[in-house]
Image (cartoon, coloured by chain):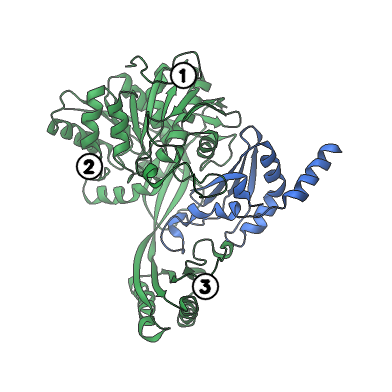
Amino acid sequence: MRVGDIAVGRAGDKGDMLDLTLVAADEAAYSLICQALSASAVQAMLNKVVPGPVLRYELPGLKALKFVMPEALAGGVYATLRPGLHWQKAAIWLLLDLDIDTQSLALKLAQGEAS
Amino acid sequence: MFNAPTWGFEMSNTSKPVYRIGAGAGFAGDRVDPAVALAASGQVDAVALECLAERTLVPAINARAANPEAGADPRLRRRLTPLLPAAASTGCKIISNLGAANPRAAGQSIASLAKDLGIKGLRVAAIEGDDVMHLRQHVAWVRPVEGRLIGAHAYLGCVPMALALEDGADVVVTGRVADSALFAAPVRQFLDGSDNALAGALTVGHLLECGGQLTGGNYETLGGPKPGNPLSAADFAALGYPLAHVYADGSADITVLDDAPALVDALTCTLQLLYEVHNPARYATPDLVLDFTGIRFEQSGPKLVHMSGARTSGPPPTLKVAGFLELPGFIADCEIGFAGTGALARAQRAADTLRLRLSDWPAQDIAIDLVGMNAVLRAGSLARGEPAELRVHVSARCQDLEMAQVIEDEVYALTLSGPAGGCSVRSERRNRIEVLDGFIDPSLIRTNILWSHS
Protein backbone atom coordinates (compact mmCIF):
# COMPACT_ATOMS: atom_id res chain seq x y z
CA MET A 1 0.00 0.00 0.00
CA ARG A 2 1.22 3.49 -0.86
CA VAL A 3 1.95 5.64 2.21
CA GLY A 4 0.04 8.49 0.54
CA ASP A 5 -3.15 6.39 0.63
CA ILE A 6 -3.18 6.35 4.44
CA ALA A 7 -1.37 9.56 5.38
CA VAL A 8 -0.99 13.15 4.19
CA GLY A 9 2.34 14.95 4.22
CA ARG A 10 4.28 18.15 3.69
CA ALA A 11 7.97 19.05 3.35
CA GLY A 12 9.58 22.10 4.93
CA ASP A 13 13.05 23.53 5.42
CA LYS A 14 15.03 25.72 7.77
CA GLY A 15 18.63 26.50 6.87
CA ASP A 16 20.36 23.19 6.18
CA MET A 17 17.46 21.21 7.68
CA LEU A 18 14.83 19.34 5.67
CA ASP A 19 11.72 18.30 7.59
CA LEU A 20 9.04 15.88 6.45
CA THR A 21 5.71 15.53 8.25
CA LEU A 22 3.24 12.68 7.84
CA VAL A 23 -0.21 12.75 9.45
CA ALA A 24 -2.06 9.44 9.43
CA ALA A 25 -5.73 9.15 8.50
CA ASP A 26 -6.59 7.14 11.65
CA GLU A 27 -5.10 5.12 14.51
CA ALA A 28 -4.57 1.98 12.40
CA ALA A 29 -2.76 3.97 9.72
CA TYR A 30 -0.63 5.61 12.41
CA SER A 31 0.41 2.19 13.76
CA LEU A 32 1.31 1.06 10.24
CA ILE A 33 3.49 4.04 9.38
CA CYS A 34 5.17 3.93 12.82
CA GLN A 35 6.07 0.33 12.17
CA ALA A 36 7.11 0.71 8.52
CA LEU A 37 8.93 4.04 8.65
CA SER A 38 11.61 3.71 11.31
CA ALA A 39 14.30 6.39 11.30
CA SER A 40 16.82 3.88 9.93
CA ALA A 41 14.47 2.67 7.17
CA VAL A 42 13.76 6.24 6.10
CA GLN A 43 17.46 7.13 6.24
CA ALA A 44 18.38 4.17 4.04
CA MET A 45 15.84 5.32 1.47
CA LEU A 46 16.51 9.08 1.70
CA ASN A 47 20.28 8.77 1.54
CA LYS A 48 19.92 8.07 -2.18
CA VAL A 49 18.56 11.60 -2.47
CA VAL A 50 19.83 13.76 0.43
CA PRO A 51 22.79 13.25 2.77
CA GLY A 52 22.94 12.93 6.52
CA PRO A 53 21.17 11.43 9.51
CA VAL A 54 17.40 11.19 10.04
CA LEU A 55 15.73 11.99 13.37
CA ARG A 56 12.18 10.76 13.99
CA TYR A 57 9.65 12.28 16.39
CA GLU A 58 6.44 10.43 17.23
CA LEU A 59 3.27 12.36 18.01
CA PRO A 60 0.65 9.74 18.91
CA GLY A 61 -1.86 12.34 20.10
CA LEU A 62 -1.75 13.97 16.68
CA LYS A 63 -1.28 10.65 14.79
CA ALA A 64 1.77 12.27 13.18
CA LEU A 65 5.39 11.36 12.46
CA LYS A 66 8.03 13.99 12.00
CA PHE A 67 11.28 13.26 10.16
CA VAL A 68 14.08 15.80 10.46
CA MET A 69 17.26 15.70 8.38
CA PRO A 70 19.62 18.34 9.80
CA GLU A 71 22.24 18.10 7.02
CA ALA A 72 20.05 17.41 3.99
CA LEU A 73 20.11 20.91 2.45
CA ALA A 74 23.75 21.91 2.87
CA GLY A 75 24.06 25.70 2.58
CA GLY A 76 20.27 26.15 2.56
CA VAL A 77 17.78 26.00 -0.28
CA TYR A 78 19.56 28.69 -2.35
CA ALA A 79 22.79 26.69 -2.51
CA THR A 80 21.12 23.87 -4.43
CA LEU A 81 22.33 22.61 -7.81
CA ARG A 82 18.84 21.40 -8.67
CA PRO A 83 16.93 23.45 -11.28
CA GLY A 84 15.31 26.63 -9.96
CA LEU A 85 14.63 27.17 -6.28
CA HIS A 86 12.76 25.27 -3.56
CA TRP A 87 13.07 21.73 -4.93
CA GLN A 88 12.54 20.52 -1.37
CA LYS A 89 8.80 21.26 -1.58
CA ALA A 90 8.56 18.00 -3.58
CA ALA A 91 10.62 15.95 -1.12
CA ILE A 92 7.55 14.66 0.75
CA TRP A 93 6.76 12.42 -2.24
CA LEU A 94 9.84 10.39 -1.30
CA LEU A 95 7.71 9.20 1.64
CA LEU A 96 4.20 9.42 0.15
CA ASP A 97 5.21 7.22 -2.80
CA LEU A 98 6.73 4.48 -0.64
CA ASP A 99 4.97 1.14 -0.80
CA ILE A 100 4.60 -0.56 2.55
CA ASP A 101 3.71 -4.18 3.01
CA THR A 102 0.62 -3.65 5.12
CA GLN A 103 -0.25 -7.35 5.53
CA SER A 104 3.01 -8.40 7.14
CA LEU A 105 3.07 -5.21 9.21
CA ALA A 106 -0.47 -5.82 10.45
CA LEU A 107 0.55 -9.36 11.40
CA LYS A 108 3.59 -8.11 13.28
CA LEU A 109 1.49 -5.50 15.07
CA ALA A 110 -1.08 -8.14 16.08
CA GLN A 111 1.66 -10.45 17.36
CA GLY A 112 3.25 -7.55 19.23
CA GLU A 113 -0.04 -6.79 20.94
CA ALA A 114 -0.61 -10.47 21.78
CA SER A 115 2.83 -11.05 23.31
CA MET B 1 -11.75 46.96 20.23
CA PHE B 2 -13.77 43.76 20.22
CA ASN B 3 -17.20 43.95 18.67
CA ALA B 4 -20.06 41.58 19.30
CA PRO B 5 -19.52 38.39 17.31
CA THR B 6 -21.49 38.27 14.08
CA TRP B 7 -20.52 34.88 12.68
CA GLY B 8 -23.28 32.45 11.97
CA PHE B 9 -22.10 29.12 13.32
CA GLU B 10 -22.10 27.57 16.74
CA MET B 11 -18.92 27.95 18.74
CA SER B 12 -17.26 24.86 20.11
CA ASN B 13 -16.56 26.58 23.41
CA THR B 14 -19.32 28.10 25.49
CA SER B 15 -17.16 31.05 26.56
CA LYS B 16 -16.70 33.89 24.12
CA PRO B 17 -13.48 34.49 22.21
CA VAL B 18 -11.51 37.52 23.32
CA TYR B 19 -9.92 38.36 19.98
CA ARG B 20 -10.35 37.59 16.27
CA ILE B 21 -7.32 37.69 13.97
CA GLY B 22 -6.86 36.85 10.31
CA ALA B 23 -3.87 35.91 8.15
CA GLY B 24 -3.49 38.39 5.33
CA ALA B 25 -0.32 37.07 3.68
CA GLY B 26 2.10 34.17 4.11
CA PHE B 27 5.11 35.50 2.20
CA ALA B 28 6.37 38.69 0.52
CA GLY B 29 4.84 37.92 -2.87
CA ASP B 30 1.57 36.53 -1.56
CA ARG B 31 -1.85 37.52 -2.91
CA VAL B 32 -3.13 40.98 -1.96
CA ASP B 33 -6.88 40.26 -1.92
CA PRO B 34 -7.14 37.88 1.10
CA ALA B 35 -6.08 40.59 3.57
CA VAL B 36 -8.50 43.08 2.01
CA ALA B 37 -11.37 40.58 2.25
CA LEU B 38 -10.60 39.86 5.91
CA ALA B 39 -10.21 43.52 6.88
CA ALA B 40 -13.38 44.59 5.05
CA SER B 41 -15.48 41.77 6.52
CA GLY B 42 -15.74 43.18 10.01
CA GLN B 43 -15.18 39.61 11.20
CA VAL B 44 -11.64 40.18 12.49
CA ASP B 45 -10.14 42.70 14.91
CA ALA B 46 -6.72 42.53 13.26
CA VAL B 47 -5.06 41.15 10.19
CA ALA B 48 -1.41 40.08 10.31
CA LEU B 49 0.68 39.83 7.17
CA GLU B 50 3.83 37.71 7.13
CA CYS B 51 5.92 39.18 4.29
CA LEU B 52 9.53 38.45 5.24
CA ALA B 53 11.01 35.02 4.61
CA GLU B 54 14.54 34.37 5.80
CA ARG B 55 16.13 35.34 2.45
CA THR B 56 13.71 38.15 1.64
CA LEU B 57 15.89 40.30 3.89
CA VAL B 58 18.91 39.98 1.59
CA PRO B 59 17.71 42.24 -1.26
CA ALA B 60 16.29 44.60 1.39
CA ILE B 61 19.67 44.85 3.16
CA ASN B 62 21.39 45.50 -0.18
CA ALA B 63 18.79 48.15 -1.10
CA ARG B 64 19.28 49.96 2.22
CA ALA B 65 23.08 49.85 1.82
CA ALA B 66 22.68 51.68 -1.51
CA ASN B 67 20.06 54.15 -0.20
CA PRO B 68 19.35 54.77 3.52
CA GLU B 69 15.68 55.53 2.71
CA ALA B 70 15.21 52.15 0.95
CA GLY B 71 15.08 48.61 2.35
CA ALA B 72 11.37 48.25 3.13
CA ASP B 73 9.26 45.78 1.15
CA PRO B 74 8.98 47.20 -2.41
CA ARG B 75 5.41 45.85 -2.57
CA LEU B 76 4.30 48.10 0.31
CA ARG B 77 2.19 50.53 -1.75
CA ARG B 78 0.63 47.86 -3.94
CA ARG B 79 -0.32 45.79 -0.90
CA LEU B 80 -1.53 48.58 1.38
CA THR B 81 -3.35 50.82 -1.13
CA PRO B 82 -6.44 48.57 -1.09
CA LEU B 83 -5.89 47.36 2.49
CA LEU B 84 -5.67 50.66 4.41
CA PRO B 85 -9.16 51.91 3.39
CA ALA B 86 -10.69 48.47 4.02
CA ALA B 87 -9.14 48.29 7.49
CA ALA B 88 -10.03 51.90 8.30
CA SER B 89 -13.69 51.21 7.46
CA THR B 90 -13.98 48.48 10.12
CA GLY B 91 -11.32 49.57 12.66
CA CYS B 92 -9.24 46.50 11.87
CA LYS B 93 -5.61 46.67 13.02
CA ILE B 94 -2.80 45.80 10.60
CA ILE B 95 0.42 44.13 11.75
CA SER B 96 3.19 43.21 9.32
CA ASN B 97 6.91 42.61 9.02
CA LEU B 98 7.00 44.30 5.62
CA GLY B 99 9.35 46.89 7.14
CA ALA B 100 12.03 44.35 6.14
CA ALA B 101 15.44 46.05 6.54
CA ASN B 102 13.94 49.50 7.16
CA PRO B 103 10.84 49.54 9.41
CA ARG B 104 11.28 53.29 10.06
CA ALA B 105 11.00 54.12 6.34
CA ALA B 106 8.08 51.68 6.02
CA GLY B 107 6.20 53.41 8.87
CA GLN B 108 6.67 56.82 7.23
CA SER B 109 5.61 55.44 3.83
CA ILE B 110 2.44 53.94 5.30
CA ALA B 111 1.48 57.22 7.04
CA SER B 112 2.16 59.10 3.82
CA LEU B 113 0.13 56.61 1.78
CA ALA B 114 -2.76 56.95 4.26
CA LYS B 115 -2.67 60.74 3.74
CA ASP B 116 -2.75 60.25 -0.04
CA LEU B 117 -5.76 57.96 0.39
CA GLY B 118 -7.57 60.54 2.53
CA ILE B 119 -7.39 58.48 5.73
CA LYS B 120 -6.96 60.88 8.64
CA GLY B 121 -5.49 60.19 12.08
CA LEU B 122 -3.96 56.78 11.31
CA ARG B 123 -1.35 55.93 13.95
CA VAL B 124 1.54 53.88 12.60
CA ALA B 125 4.17 52.33 14.87
CA ALA B 126 7.48 51.08 13.47
CA ILE B 127 9.49 48.67 15.62
CA GLU B 128 13.28 48.86 15.36
CA GLY B 129 15.92 46.75 17.06
CA ASP B 130 16.13 43.51 15.12
CA ASP B 131 19.21 44.67 13.18
CA VAL B 132 22.11 43.37 15.33
CA MET B 133 24.93 43.93 12.85
CA HIS B 134 26.59 46.24 15.41
CA LEU B 135 26.39 43.40 17.98
CA ARG B 136 27.79 40.72 15.68
CA GLN B 137 30.77 40.11 17.98
CA HIS B 138 28.27 39.05 20.68
CA VAL B 139 26.52 36.50 18.46
CA ALA B 140 27.35 32.83 19.03
CA TRP B 141 27.36 31.56 15.41
CA VAL B 142 26.75 27.85 14.81
CA ARG B 143 29.79 27.72 12.53
CA PRO B 144 32.64 30.10 11.68
CA VAL B 145 31.84 33.14 9.53
CA GLU B 146 33.15 32.42 6.01
CA GLY B 147 32.56 34.94 3.25
CA ARG B 148 31.29 38.49 3.75
CA LEU B 149 28.66 39.00 6.46
CA ILE B 150 26.21 41.46 4.84
CA GLY B 151 23.62 41.54 7.63
CA ALA B 152 22.56 40.06 10.97
CA HIS B 153 19.00 40.26 12.28
CA ALA B 154 17.61 38.87 15.54
CA TYR B 155 14.13 37.37 15.73
CA LEU B 156 12.17 39.68 18.07
CA GLY B 157 9.15 38.59 20.10
CA CYS B 158 5.66 40.02 20.46
CA VAL B 159 6.16 42.46 23.36
CA PRO B 160 7.26 45.64 21.49
CA MET B 161 4.40 45.19 19.01
CA ALA B 162 1.93 44.51 21.83
CA LEU B 163 3.01 47.69 23.66
CA ALA B 164 2.59 49.76 20.48
CA LEU B 165 -0.93 48.35 20.03
CA GLU B 166 -1.80 49.04 23.67
CA ASP B 167 -0.62 52.63 23.06
CA GLY B 168 -3.13 52.96 20.24
CA ALA B 169 -1.32 51.93 17.08
CA ASP B 170 -3.60 51.19 14.12
CA VAL B 171 -0.75 49.78 12.06
CA VAL B 172 2.40 48.11 13.39
CA VAL B 173 5.29 47.52 11.03
CA THR B 174 8.44 45.61 11.87
CA GLY B 175 11.53 44.03 10.42
CA ARG B 176 12.59 40.58 11.55
CA VAL B 177 10.29 39.21 14.24
CA ALA B 178 9.10 35.66 14.81
CA ASP B 179 6.18 35.08 12.45
CA SER B 180 4.08 33.71 15.31
CA ALA B 181 4.68 36.93 17.28
CA LEU B 182 2.94 39.02 14.59
CA PHE B 183 -0.28 37.23 15.49
CA ALA B 184 0.21 36.92 19.26
CA ALA B 185 1.02 40.64 19.68
CA PRO B 186 -2.54 42.03 19.42
CA VAL B 187 -4.06 39.10 21.34
CA ARG B 188 -1.67 39.21 24.32
CA GLN B 189 -3.46 41.88 26.41
CA PHE B 190 -6.77 39.97 26.27
CA LEU B 191 -5.40 36.63 27.50
CA ASP B 192 -5.72 35.33 31.06
CA GLY B 193 -2.07 36.22 31.80
CA SER B 194 -0.77 32.65 32.02
CA ASP B 195 2.23 31.45 30.04
CA ASN B 196 0.16 28.61 28.55
CA ALA B 197 -2.40 31.11 27.21
CA LEU B 198 0.37 33.07 25.48
CA ALA B 199 1.70 29.73 24.22
CA GLY B 200 -1.75 29.18 22.70
CA ALA B 201 -1.74 32.57 20.99
CA LEU B 202 1.76 31.92 19.62
CA THR B 203 0.59 28.51 18.39
CA VAL B 204 -2.31 30.24 16.62
CA GLY B 205 0.29 32.51 15.03
CA HIS B 206 2.38 29.54 13.97
CA LEU B 207 -0.72 27.98 12.38
CA LEU B 208 -1.78 31.16 10.55
CA GLU B 209 1.61 32.50 9.46
CA CYS B 210 1.65 30.65 6.12
CA GLY B 211 -1.79 31.91 5.06
CA GLY B 212 -3.46 29.54 2.59
CA GLN B 213 -1.25 26.63 3.58
CA LEU B 214 -3.57 26.14 6.60
CA THR B 215 -6.75 26.18 4.53
CA GLY B 216 -6.08 23.71 1.73
CA GLY B 217 -3.18 25.27 -0.17
CA ASN B 218 -0.10 23.11 -0.80
CA TYR B 219 -2.15 20.20 0.50
CA GLU B 220 -2.83 16.86 -1.15
CA THR B 221 -5.73 14.84 0.21
CA LEU B 222 -5.40 11.14 0.99
CA GLY B 223 -4.68 9.05 -2.07
CA GLY B 224 -3.58 11.93 -4.25
CA PRO B 225 -5.45 14.05 -6.79
CA LYS B 226 -8.67 12.51 -8.08
CA PRO B 227 -12.18 13.55 -9.05
CA GLY B 228 -13.97 14.90 -6.02
CA ASN B 229 -10.78 16.33 -4.56
CA PRO B 230 -12.29 19.01 -2.36
CA LEU B 231 -10.62 22.03 -3.97
CA SER B 232 -11.06 22.86 -7.67
CA ALA B 233 -8.97 25.33 -9.67
CA ALA B 234 -11.68 27.93 -9.06
CA ASP B 235 -11.44 27.20 -5.32
CA PHE B 236 -7.65 27.61 -5.31
CA ALA B 237 -7.95 30.83 -7.31
CA ALA B 238 -10.17 32.29 -4.56
CA LEU B 239 -8.80 30.35 -1.58
CA GLY B 240 -9.97 31.68 1.78
CA TYR B 241 -7.17 32.60 4.17
CA PRO B 242 -7.46 31.52 7.78
CA LEU B 243 -8.74 33.43 10.76
CA ALA B 244 -8.81 32.48 14.43
CA HIS B 245 -11.16 33.29 17.28
CA VAL B 246 -8.87 33.17 20.29
CA TYR B 247 -10.12 32.47 23.83
CA ALA B 248 -8.63 33.86 27.04
CA ASP B 249 -6.96 30.51 27.80
CA GLY B 250 -5.16 30.50 24.44
CA SER B 251 -7.39 27.91 22.78
CA ALA B 252 -8.90 28.97 19.47
CA ASP B 253 -11.34 28.23 16.68
CA ILE B 254 -9.68 28.15 13.26
CA THR B 255 -11.90 28.97 10.30
CA VAL B 256 -12.30 31.15 7.18
CA LEU B 257 -14.74 33.87 6.16
CA ASP B 258 -18.25 32.63 5.40
CA ASP B 259 -18.52 31.12 1.91
CA ALA B 260 -14.75 31.29 1.23
CA PRO B 261 -13.52 28.12 -0.51
CA ALA B 262 -11.19 26.27 1.85
CA LEU B 263 -10.36 23.00 3.52
CA VAL B 264 -10.01 23.27 7.30
CA ASP B 265 -9.78 20.00 9.20
CA ALA B 266 -7.58 18.19 11.71
CA LEU B 267 -5.24 16.98 8.95
CA THR B 268 -4.61 20.42 7.42
CA CYS B 269 -4.15 21.90 10.90
CA THR B 270 -1.78 19.15 12.08
CA LEU B 271 0.38 19.44 8.95
CA GLN B 272 0.73 23.17 9.46
CA LEU B 273 1.35 22.81 13.21
CA LEU B 274 4.39 20.64 12.49
CA TYR B 275 5.57 22.53 9.38
CA GLU B 276 9.25 23.53 9.61
CA VAL B 277 9.37 22.48 13.26
CA HIS B 278 12.31 20.46 14.51
CA ASN B 279 11.52 18.99 17.93
CA PRO B 280 7.72 19.34 18.38
CA ALA B 281 8.14 19.26 22.18
CA ARG B 282 10.54 22.22 22.14
CA TYR B 283 9.69 24.72 19.41
CA ALA B 284 11.62 27.85 20.35
CA THR B 285 10.05 31.25 19.70
CA PRO B 286 11.51 34.50 21.09
CA ASP B 287 8.68 34.71 23.65
CA LEU B 288 8.30 31.11 24.78
CA VAL B 289 9.50 27.59 24.01
CA LEU B 290 6.35 25.81 22.81
CA ASP B 291 5.37 22.20 23.41
CA PHE B 292 3.06 20.98 20.63
CA THR B 293 2.75 17.39 21.84
CA GLY B 294 -0.45 18.09 23.80
CA ILE B 295 -2.19 20.05 21.02
CA ARG B 296 -5.55 18.65 19.93
CA PHE B 297 -7.65 19.59 16.91
CA GLU B 298 -11.36 18.89 16.98
CA GLN B 299 -13.64 19.45 13.99
CA SER B 300 -16.50 21.50 15.43
CA GLY B 301 -18.27 22.60 12.25
CA PRO B 302 -17.82 22.92 8.51
CA LYS B 303 -14.43 24.54 7.88
CA LEU B 304 -14.16 25.04 11.66
CA VAL B 305 -11.57 23.37 13.93
CA HIS B 306 -11.06 23.92 17.67
CA MET B 307 -7.41 23.99 18.80
CA SER B 308 -6.45 23.40 22.43
CA GLY B 309 -3.64 22.03 24.58
CA ALA B 310 -0.75 24.45 23.92
CA ARG B 311 1.91 24.37 26.63
CA THR B 312 5.25 26.00 27.31
CA SER B 313 8.37 25.32 29.35
CA GLY B 314 9.03 29.08 29.60
CA PRO B 315 11.07 31.64 27.68
CA PRO B 316 14.19 30.62 25.75
CA PRO B 317 17.60 31.66 27.13
CA THR B 318 18.70 33.24 23.82
CA LEU B 319 17.25 34.82 20.70
CA LYS B 320 17.97 33.38 17.26
CA VAL B 321 19.93 35.52 14.81
CA ALA B 322 19.96 35.06 11.04
CA GLY B 323 23.24 36.17 9.47
CA PHE B 324 23.67 36.45 5.71
CA LEU B 325 26.94 35.50 4.05
CA GLU B 326 27.86 36.53 0.56
CA LEU B 327 30.17 33.94 -0.98
CA PRO B 328 32.29 34.61 -4.05
CA GLY B 329 31.06 33.32 -7.38
CA PHE B 330 27.73 32.34 -8.91
CA ILE B 331 25.54 29.37 -9.62
CA ALA B 332 24.83 29.05 -13.35
CA ASP B 333 21.51 27.22 -13.93
CA CYS B 334 20.80 26.32 -17.60
CA GLU B 335 18.40 24.12 -19.54
CA ILE B 336 17.90 22.93 -23.12
CA GLY B 337 14.78 21.17 -24.38
CA PHE B 338 14.13 18.15 -26.59
CA ALA B 339 10.75 17.22 -28.11
CA GLY B 340 9.19 14.74 -30.49
CA THR B 341 9.84 11.05 -31.07
CA GLY B 342 13.05 9.94 -29.35
CA ALA B 343 13.16 12.99 -27.05
CA LEU B 344 14.36 10.85 -24.14
CA ALA B 345 17.21 9.21 -26.08
CA ARG B 346 18.36 12.55 -27.51
CA ALA B 347 18.15 14.27 -24.11
CA GLN B 348 20.15 11.47 -22.47
CA ARG B 349 22.78 11.72 -25.20
CA ALA B 350 22.92 15.52 -24.79
CA ALA B 351 23.41 15.09 -21.02
CA ASP B 352 26.22 12.59 -21.64
CA THR B 353 27.82 14.99 -24.15
CA LEU B 354 27.82 17.72 -21.49
CA ARG B 355 29.35 15.32 -18.96
CA LEU B 356 32.24 14.76 -21.38
CA ARG B 357 32.61 18.43 -22.29
CA LEU B 358 32.57 19.49 -18.61
CA SER B 359 34.49 16.54 -17.18
CA ASP B 360 37.11 18.88 -15.66
CA TRP B 361 34.51 20.54 -13.41
CA PRO B 362 34.76 19.40 -9.75
CA ALA B 363 32.07 16.75 -9.34
CA GLN B 364 30.64 18.30 -6.17
CA ASP B 365 30.10 21.62 -8.00
CA ILE B 366 28.06 20.43 -10.96
CA ALA B 367 24.77 18.61 -11.53
CA ILE B 368 23.55 17.36 -14.92
CA ASP B 369 20.11 15.73 -15.04
CA LEU B 370 16.84 15.58 -16.99
CA VAL B 371 13.92 17.83 -16.00
CA GLY B 372 10.91 15.58 -16.39
CA MET B 373 12.82 12.49 -15.23
CA ASN B 374 15.10 12.90 -12.24
CA ALA B 375 16.10 16.55 -11.71
CA VAL B 376 14.12 17.11 -8.52
CA LEU B 377 13.90 13.80 -6.64
CA ARG B 378 17.02 12.34 -8.31
CA ALA B 379 17.31 8.64 -7.44
CA GLY B 380 13.96 8.90 -5.64
CA SER B 381 12.12 9.72 -8.88
CA LEU B 382 9.72 7.15 -10.31
CA ALA B 383 9.73 6.66 -14.10
CA ARG B 384 6.24 6.34 -15.58
CA GLY B 385 6.63 5.86 -19.35
CA GLU B 386 8.47 8.04 -21.81
CA PRO B 387 7.62 11.77 -21.74
CA ALA B 388 6.88 13.67 -24.95
CA GLU B 389 9.25 16.48 -24.01
CA LEU B 390 12.27 16.72 -21.73
CA ARG B 391 14.81 19.30 -20.65
CA VAL B 392 18.47 18.66 -19.93
CA HIS B 393 19.48 20.70 -16.89
CA VAL B 394 22.94 21.81 -15.74
CA SER B 395 23.74 23.74 -12.58
CA ALA B 396 27.32 24.52 -11.66
CA ARG B 397 29.06 26.54 -8.97
CA CYS B 398 31.29 29.01 -10.80
CA GLN B 399 34.14 31.15 -9.45
CA ASP B 400 33.21 34.16 -11.57
CA LEU B 401 30.99 35.37 -14.40
CA GLU B 402 33.39 34.12 -17.04
CA MET B 403 33.09 30.56 -15.75
CA ALA B 404 29.29 30.93 -15.68
CA GLN B 405 29.54 31.92 -19.34
CA VAL B 406 31.51 28.73 -20.08
CA ILE B 407 28.67 26.59 -18.70
CA GLU B 408 26.03 28.53 -20.62
CA ASP B 409 28.03 28.37 -23.86
CA GLU B 410 28.46 24.60 -23.59
CA VAL B 411 24.69 24.20 -23.32
CA TYR B 412 24.04 26.52 -26.29
CA ALA B 413 26.72 24.72 -28.32
CA LEU B 414 24.57 21.58 -28.21
CA THR B 415 22.12 23.28 -30.59
CA LEU B 416 24.74 23.01 -33.37
CA SER B 417 26.97 20.18 -32.24
CA GLY B 418 24.76 17.91 -30.12
CA PRO B 419 21.81 15.55 -30.66
CA ALA B 420 19.10 16.75 -33.04
CA GLY B 421 16.58 19.39 -32.07
CA GLY B 422 18.08 20.98 -28.94
CA CYS B 423 15.63 23.85 -28.30
CA SER B 424 14.11 26.34 -25.87
CA VAL B 425 17.37 27.13 -24.07
CA ARG B 426 17.26 29.25 -20.95
CA SER B 427 19.84 30.19 -18.33
CA GLU B 428 20.13 32.20 -15.14
CA ARG B 429 22.85 33.16 -12.70
CA ARG B 430 22.35 33.30 -8.96
CA ASN B 431 24.51 35.00 -6.36
CA ARG B 432 25.78 32.70 -3.66
CA ILE B 433 24.16 33.80 -0.39
CA GLU B 434 24.09 31.50 2.61
CA VAL B 435 22.25 31.90 5.90
CA LEU B 436 24.26 31.48 9.08
CA ASP B 437 22.31 30.92 12.30
CA GLY B 438 23.48 32.31 15.60
CA PHE B 439 22.22 33.09 19.09
CA ILE B 440 22.33 36.27 21.16
CA ASP B 441 21.62 37.26 24.77
CA PRO B 442 18.19 39.01 24.67
CA SER B 443 19.34 41.60 27.23
CA LEU B 444 21.70 43.08 24.59
CA ILE B 445 18.79 43.95 22.28
CA ARG B 446 17.31 47.46 22.44
CA THR B 447 13.96 47.89 20.72
CA ASN B 448 12.49 51.24 19.78
CA ILE B 449 8.99 52.33 18.70
CA LEU B 450 8.82 55.15 16.13
CA TRP B 451 5.45 56.80 15.49
CA SER B 452 4.07 58.31 12.28
CA HIS B 453 0.61 59.81 11.74
CA SER B 454 -1.53 60.57 8.74
Name above or below for residue B348 compared with residue B46: below
Give the image location of residue B334, x and y in percent: 38, 70
Q: In which quadrant is the C terminus of chain B drawn?
A: top left
Indicate which disc, 2 or 3, sits on the residue closer to the N terminus.
2
Mark 1 surroundings within 10 Å by alpha-carbon count, few (fewer than 14), some (14 through 19), many (20 or more): few
Residue B173 visible to an observer of this rendering: no
Would you name the residue on which mark 1 appears? B10
Mark 2 belongs to chain: B
**Distance from the alpha carbon under mark 2 to that under mark 3:** 45 Å
* Between marks 2 and 1 in the image, the one whose residue lies nearer the viewer: 1
Q: Determine the residue positioned at 51% across, 19% down.
A: B12
Q: Nearer the viewer, residue B61 or B318?
A: B61
Q: CA distance from mark 1 to mark 3?
A: 61 Å
Residue holding disc 3: B363
**Camera-nearest label, 1 or 3:** 1
Kind of residue at badge 2: Arg
Residue plotted at (32% across, 22% down): B165
Does B370 sit above or below residue B312? below
Q: Are marks 2 and 1 in contact (CB under 8 Å)?
A: no
Evaluate if marks 1 and 3 touch, with contact meaning CB atoms under 8 Å apart: no
**Residue at which label 2 appears:** B78
* Chain A colour as displayed: blue
Give the secondary structure at mark 1.
loop
